[in-house]
Amino acid sequence: MSEEWVEEWKEELTEERILQMLEERQYKQLKEELENNMYPVDLADILEEFEQKQMVMVFRLLAKEEAAETFAYMNSDMREILINALTDSELEEVMEEMYLDDTVDVLEEMPANVVDRLLMMTDEEKRRQINQLLQYPEESAGSVMNVDYIALRRDMTVAEAILKIRQVGLNRETIYTCYVTEKKKLIGVVDVKELLTTSESKLMEEIMDTNMLYAQTTDDQEDVAKTITKYGLIALPIVDHEMCMVGIVTVDDAMLVLQEETTEDISIMAGVNPSEESYFGTTVIEHVKSRIPWLLFLMLSATVTQMIMNSYENALAVMPQLAGFIPMLTGTGGNCGSQSSTLVIRGLAVGEIEFADVLKVIWKEVRIAVCISIVLAVVNGIRIMLMGQGDATMAVTIGVTMACTVIIAKVVGCTLPLIAEKVGLDPAIMATPLISTLVDISTISVYFAIVSAVFAL
Amino acid sequence: MSEEWVEEWKEELTEERILQMLEERQYKQLKEELENNMYPVDLADILEEFEQKQMVMVFRLLAKEEAAETFAYMNSDMREILINALTDSELEEVMEEMYLDDTVDVLEEMPANVVDRLLMMTDEEKRRQINQLLQYPEESAGSVMNVDYIALRRDMTVAEAILKIRQVGLNRETIYTCYVTEKKKLIGVVDVKELLTTSESKLMEEIMDTNMLYAQTTDDQEDVAKTITKYGLIALPIVDHEMCMVGIVTVDDAMLVLQEETTEDISIMAGVNPSEESYFGTTVIEHVKSRIPWLLFLMLSATVTQMIMNSYENALAVMPQLAGFIPMLTGTGGNCGSQSSTLVIRGLAVGEIEFADVLKVIWKEVRIAVCISIVLAVVNGIRIMLMGQGDATMAVTIGVTMACTVIIAKVVGCTLPLIAEKVGLDPAIMATPLISTLVDISTISVYFAIVSAVFAL
């Protein structure tokens, strides 16, 4: 049989095979294969490529539980098509099977009339919980938490606790840590591992860990995700201001939060206002809107560089070859600065660097900058001589400018993200685009100050 | 008592309190508090700031299990100090308590003589496993997997399975999914949730999921981590080429892998060769070595720009104010290009964009570029007129150059990462530094071609 199993596994349920089975009306076989041979997250991906009618047909073949999970992984366009195509009773089944946190995600993206229709499908208790969840601020722990978890009493025995888990069921992550509460207040946590490996007559209060980690509903989702990563947790309990337990954030949601937040950081570092939607899910106009503010700001900031250069017009008229060195100097300065700012921004993001380290960071960057500037200046000097772009004086002049540029760029690049962190701004805005504009200004100033002194322009 | 608990929680065990208790020789109380009131990952952080003698003293107070976990979180310098300070029997206890994957991490960083001493402390069976693990290539699934997991037989009942978990114990993540094997071959998985909620007499082969996900020892650790994220798993089984089960990668390790890989990507995107060590853990010379290759390459590439500019020396001598626009044009081009390349690189990293989308991406970027170029050209034209930096002809000329620059930058920026992916390079190398150098060259060429035509230079 293990041979047979390997065979089964290989026969993948691809987009083409599903379409073929639909065409040949092999609904029963398709239904069976969908159930045994397909993960909801993959099915949602596949259905995205389908036409509306086919998508609805496949969706109708799914078992309740799979249907609900697949629905949760779909994008908002697909969800709207389904909501319009399904009957009220079909929709009710899907809504019943969905976890509350997924339901809330779905509702947040739907137009008001659809939300009303969906809410009418849910029973009163669930409606109350949904409304509660919808009120938590975006990106807060409350907005990503799961309200399904196992709550135990301190005077329960291990056997009673296991019985409770049996009865309540729920999904995987939500049962692996249980929470001991007293008048709704969180007083301890018990791992399922503990329950499985301890004598059945022990009481929760004997085995629970009272020195537990938790977060509040209003805490930032990123901090919650970082705590889960740092301590290697399966779930983190979320409490309100009175320590009453209201939900949990599970490790799988934490991983998605971290991925989203990293994408956001990287966007900001490239001068793009982050969007919730995917690259293709964002329209051209939205892309333009999210990219143009920084471009405009930086373009106008470059006016300063231009003004400095214009004040040296006469020098350029006499020695026009001076202009040729400018892109190389500003480019190198920009690259040096962005190396430093990027490493510091990432260090801040993963919690390795903090503002208190500012002098340590600057001292390190200065030493790095000195080493780098010597290498670059010497290599560039040799290049200038070899290519006949100038004499020894020119080589030394450019070398000195290069050294100053590298040192200034590195110091500015490492300091600004730390200052941003200190004053409560996102350090990611201090990345390449801004740093390179600032470095441009200082490079041009230093360059013309030095060359006009050396060549008496 | 719940009040009391809240009090207890607040009284944090800080660095200062530990030092004070050491000084006052309150060893017993310190030992107790370390056990109840401190997470190993936090203690490792705190001990990093301690002097050697104090660190060793605190470490000796820890219970075996805590000691092993704290040791696993320490950096290699701290570990070496401890290894030299501890007696053989103390060291043996720590080694016995450590999970195998942590032991291997420790050994990989130690000098050969220390490895020998440590290996002598372990029993033969463990030594054999360690040697096996040390052979997996770096960053492979085999190198991060955990060899402790619960293996069940297909003919076991639920009750027998639970008994086995009780006997074997192990840590949390490693028991929440159990693996059904037959002659060591992986044939199915069973969630602990399944065990807890099914009738005790059912057999594993009745409840196991045979359509399970798995990875091979030689698979990339990043792919394994992505699978765990995508499917929301607690652990992924790792098999050898014959489908024999050899270990699992747990979700907590997957999160650390993803964090490392993101840091690597971000470093490469800033033109820094990634290092395994932290920012402060890397010496100045190592920082220089990891940053200088790209800086040198890009500085020398800028020679091309310089050569183009030098060929227009006469034009610059006649109209030196032309040079003033260069930093603004190259800066804007660089920023436009890096916006596009960064979004595409991230899209590739999270699996949203693939090479097959290349035309879709270019078409999107071209439309975005047209919109952006119109806005930037108009705003800049108005600025030039208002600041008296040129007449209408100059404003239009710069505007046209700006538009060309933006469009070229966006197309180059979005295409290169996709090409890199296609030819098997890391798309992250196609980020800002390289793009901005390439865009510099095209901007300068376009600029001088246009101005020399317009102003008949």
Image (spheres, coloured by chain):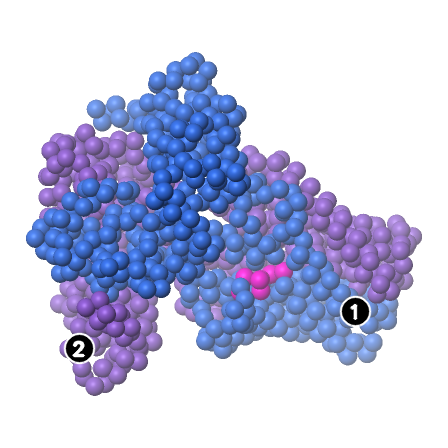
Chain colours: A blue, B purple
| Circle 1 Cα neighbour tier, 10 Å, few/some/many (<14 / 14–19 / ≥20) | some
- Chain of the residue displaying label 1: A
Q: Splitting the image into 4 quarters, where does residue B56 fall?
A: bottom left
**Quarter of the rendering occupied by the N terminus of chain A:** top left
Image coordinates for residue A372, horizontal then vertical, percent: 57, 69
Query: Relative to B38, is B397 on the left or the right?
Result: right
User: Depth check: B91 or A72 in front?
Assistant: A72
Mark 2 belongs to chain: B
Q: Nearer the viewer, residue A259 or B424?
A: A259
Identify residue for label 1: A307
Screen quadrant of the C terminus of chain A:
bottom right
Q: Residue at x 13, y 43 (%)?
A: B162
- Residue B148 image offset from top left, x and y in percent: 21, 48
Q: What amino acid is at disc 2? A: Gln
- Extreme residue toward the bottom, this view: B24
Structural crowding at the residue carrying mark 2, measured as other residues with C-alpha within 10 Å and reported as few (<14), some (14–19) or many (≥20)? few
Picture layout, residue A219 above or below residue A248? below
Reply yes or no: does residue A20 show up in magenta.
no
Location of residue B394 by image quarter: bottom right
Q: Are marks 1 and 2 on the same chain?
A: no
Report the residue marked by disc 2: B29
